[in-house]
Amino acid sequence: MPEPTVDSPATADATDTAPAPGSPHGALAAHVRNAGPGDRAALARMDPDALRPHEIAALSRALLTAGLQPETWRPETWPRWALIAHGMALAGHDGAGRLGRQLALAGVAESRVTKLLTARGEAFRQLLPRVLRLLASKGVQPNWFELGELVLKEDSRAHDDIQRAEQLRMRIAGSYFSAMATKA
């Protein structure tokens, strides 16, 4: 049997969902999962674009526990990480699967996935919690190694971030449509 190539599905599953070395997403997910009821509720209920004091406290504890250094961030970085923590509190984290397949497993409609993957900026930030609530209602936890990176890069002006966000969108779409085709 020939060795799998870099683009083959066998290697894509293993490498695409694994966290990057030093990725804080797993640590953040573990903190959110093990947080006390007050912090977890604050993270689940917060509006990432309009943080209130008790939400900032819960978010700061979570970010610091994950090894992040929010005191060095630009103002636009806070809402991105707040959205990630909020999403983890809503839907959990499963880094073992591919996000596109998880969306298909939850039965998320093609139109909703397409809308999410084509949305940018504010529209993306509004759509994502809705999709996460849908995943949670179906008992499917998303892969935050993929989704978290997309949240961090999706609205960036940096050329490399724009390219990486597009790669992530295409990878998510590819695994979603592949999973949907095998369901049919």
Image (cartoon, rainbow, N blue to C red):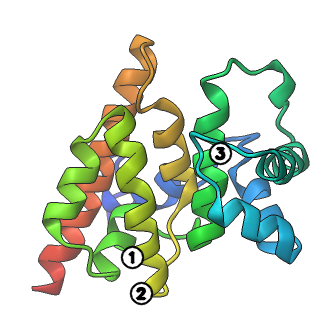
The residue that label 2 is drawn on is 138
Mark 3 or 2: in front is: 3
40 or 163, which is in the foreground?
A: 40
103 or 10, which is in the foreground?
A: 103
Category of crowding for the residue at label 1, using alpha-carbon neighbours closer than 10 angstroms: few (below 14), some (14–19), many (at least 20): some
Mark earlier in primary sequence (3, 2): 3
The residue that label 3 is drawn on is 82
Q: Are marks 2 and 1 in contact (CB under 8 Å)?
A: yes
Residue 98, can we see it?
Answer: no
Residue at position x 39%, y 73% from top?
A: 102
Q: Which secondary structure, mark 1?
A: helix
Q: Which secondary structure, mark 2?
A: loop
Identified by mark 2, the residue type is Lys
Identified by mark 1, the residue type is Leu
Quadrant where the N terminus is found in the figure: bottom left
Q: Which secondary structure, mark 3?
A: helix
Identified by mark 3, the residue type is Ala
135 displayed left or right of 47: left
42 or 71, which is in the foreground?
A: 42
The residue that label 1 is drawn on is 134
Q: Are marks 3 and 2 in contact (CB under 8 Å)?
A: no
175 or 79, which is in the foreground?
A: 79
Residue 44 location in percent, x, y? 65, 66
Residue at position x 33%, y 63% from top?
A: 100
Residue 57 location in percent, x, y? 87, 48
